[in-house]
Amino acid sequence: MYFPLLLPESESELNLRVAKARKAMEAHKLEAMLIVSSANMFYFAGGIFNGYIWLSLTDGPIFFVVPPLKTDSPLSRSIRKPEQIPALLADEGIRIPKRVGLEFDDLLYTEVKRLSGLFPDSEIADASVAMRECRAVKTPYELKVMREDGRKQAAVYSRIPHCYQEGMTDLEFQIEIEHVLRREGCLGFPRVAGRRMEINLGSVLAGENADEPSPYDFSMGGAGADPSLPVGASGTIMHPGIAVMVDMNGGFNGYQTDMTRVWSIEGLPKLAYDAHRCSCDILRDLEKFARPGVEIGELYRRARRLAEDAGLSEYFMGHNHQVKFIGHGVGIQLNEIPVIMERNRGLLAENMTIAIEPKFVLPGVGAVGVENTYIVTPDGLENITPLDEDIHEL
Amino acid sequence: MYFPLLLPESESELNLRVAKARKAMEAHKLEAMLIVSSANMFYFAGGIFNGYIWLSLTDGPIFFVVPPLKTDSPLSRSIRKPEQIPALLADEGIRIPKRVGLEFDDLLYTEVKRLSGLFPDSEIADASVAMRECRAVKTPYELKVMREDGRKQAAVYSRIPHCYQEGMTDLEFQIEIEHVLRREGCLGFPRVAGRRMEINLGSVLAGENADEPSPYDFSMGGAGADPSLPVGASGTIMHPGIAVMVDMNGGFNGYQTDMTRVWSIEGLPKLAYDAHRCSCDILRDLEKFARPGVEIGELYRRARRLAEDAGLSEYFMGHNHQVKFIGHGVGIQLNEIPVIMERNRGLLAENMTIAIEPKFVLPGVGAVGVENTYIVTPDGLENITPLDEDIHEL
């Protein structure tokens, strides 16, 4: 394998990403960054390799690649360990600037300490936030890839009813959906930001289990099948009268889309259909309202207001435990910025990709609501996970 | 859910683990630790929760639990954020010692920085290495759980031939094996140490793909199905004359076992059977030789010598790229200590659990060799993943 990997439309795409990154670096007063995390590495290289990427406002990117990977690009250099980087930069007449960024929120403490040692005369600052901001707004090529992801995820979701057999547990149902996902090309590895999100391929939440809190930052919890992984399906039999919420991974190509649909077993109480309708109403409202320049917190407030108007506040985004957001950015990582929560005073920007998931948890019934992944366009939101949103019988 | 979760044989088991941890803390001159990482949290609590565990040489463990999780144990306290911990400790008359450990090799840089701020008058030292050493030697209860894991993994492996259909790709074969694993209770989340091991449920390596290096620290590589996850099956059709190595996850209960077997398609060249026989010979040799007090590096050297004696050096642990270890500790995490490599001068201890995987990569054929997970006993190694080791036809 050779690095950097070719992105389709490669050189112009790399230049575009570098320009976007430099703009974010300037905003955070970073003169250079040494990139190590998988997500940011994938952003610049189009693939994961053992190595490091140097990018300054004026130089790079330089891809420092550890053997046995080979380099045949003028952008790549072979190294055995990161301690060689300063001398290699000096050889090329590249000075190490005063303020160098490392990914404080993506690397382990020991990694940052080691890499800080490469730049003893520089102030070491955080590069994670700058890169998160850079990646929040997608390039046209990234949007194309994510649309493809969304199509694939929706195609799998259309086959979900065939995964069900009467008397199954939620976990058995989830495993059959996983199987279809994998057969249709899902890579089986949801890349998440941060350290504290542990997950397999997503969650099936059936009935009351939707109201079990999880230690992770997911919109809905679930007790999980084992205390070592307390999230999602718990192994309980799916019985008549419960809602079955499916929120499974849509990662087919290094990017991900995020999507939720709900099924029922022998019908649900009227309140469940009302709440589900409210979730769809919220999405329709935000699809028109959300556009570049709109304050992100206002999306949350509008959604909450619509839930209030429908008399559903106590079930909104949980019942025993209500989470305080209704969506999040999505892309290379499942949980990117912006977080769509009340206190986010940031503004939506064109070509952000966001998952919106207004959900309700009803005691004795379970979770209802829809999640789609959207592109922010000047005309509102473009749904890239379109699929029938009604609650159908399993 | 209430914390701490009950481990079976709970109180005595917790006391035993605390005693082991304190011994490791003393060896590393740690007077206290604040534990946050999932693996170490699971070790003390028997489950993952949103919170923190305080353990000093004289006090604790105290489980600081963030709502909505409830606490009903005398060992638990409810908190909203870690900054409350020092005052809560002071309330109980617990002084914060001079040297406090945080998990430098398990937490993000930002996490360690934030948590360091709780103890402004203390020296902050690493707790990762102490906990790794503590966990390397298992308790009798842990051994029981891992034996159960091994039994389950071996049972799944015995069904692997049924997953095969002629004309399949390596990836399709892997997905069918994943499906059986999940149906038999595999949790679907391989917990690994460090940040740079990204993996789905394991690897099927068919033919030449076994010789593709991966950016991760696995014994064998594989190009993977996508540049965003370059490890394991690559989607190539399995054709006659290749070896198919299966190294899939065995995590059923918070612990994992690690196991590899090989199948063939319409026979292999004699060299492949010879190399596979050599792998089994190495395991038989080490099963007798390895016992408490033996230098760990000597296991590697004996294995390499047997490979040399068989004239197989150039294929040992890779061909284009040879890795320098033949095994590793395994338990809550897939990659624990000890690493069985030449320069490891540490000694085996009773009740360590190690995966040994002498493998060979043959050009044009693929990877052969066996991996088992073992318990170190006074009489040698106890194989907890016993299953026929021969190469059979798919």
Image (cartoon, coloured by chain):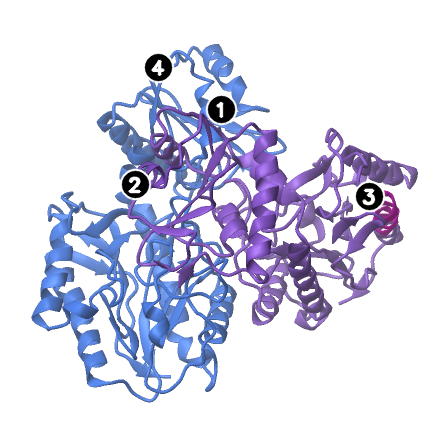
Chain colours: A purple, B blue
Query: Which residue was labeled with disc 1?
Result: B114
Where, quadrant-wise, is the C terminus of chain B in this rendering?
A: bottom left
Q: Main secondary structure of the magenta part?
A: helix
> Does dot 4 land on a helix, a strand or a loop?
loop
Of the two numbered discs 2 and 4 in the rendering, the one whose residue sits closer to the viewer:
2
Instruction: Give the magenta part as a residue range.
Output: A278-291
The residue that appears at 18% across and 45% down in the rendered structure is B349
Q: Position of residue B147 (x, y in %)?
A: 32, 57
Q: Alpha carbon of mark 1 to alpha carbon of mark 2: how far?
A: 30 Å
Q: Alpha carbon of mark 3 to alpha carbon of mark 2: how far?
A: 46 Å
Q: Earlier in the sequence, mark 3 or mark 2?
A: 2
Of residues A49 and A25, which is closer to you in this image? A25
Q: Which residue reaches farthest bottom?
A: B266
Query: Which residue was labeled with disc 4?
Result: B97
Of residues A130 and A389, which is closer to you in this image? A130
Q: Position of residue B270 (x, y in %)?
A: 20, 85
Local crowd size for mark 3, using a 10 Å CA cut-off: few (<14), some (14–19), many (≥20): many
Chain for disc number 1: B
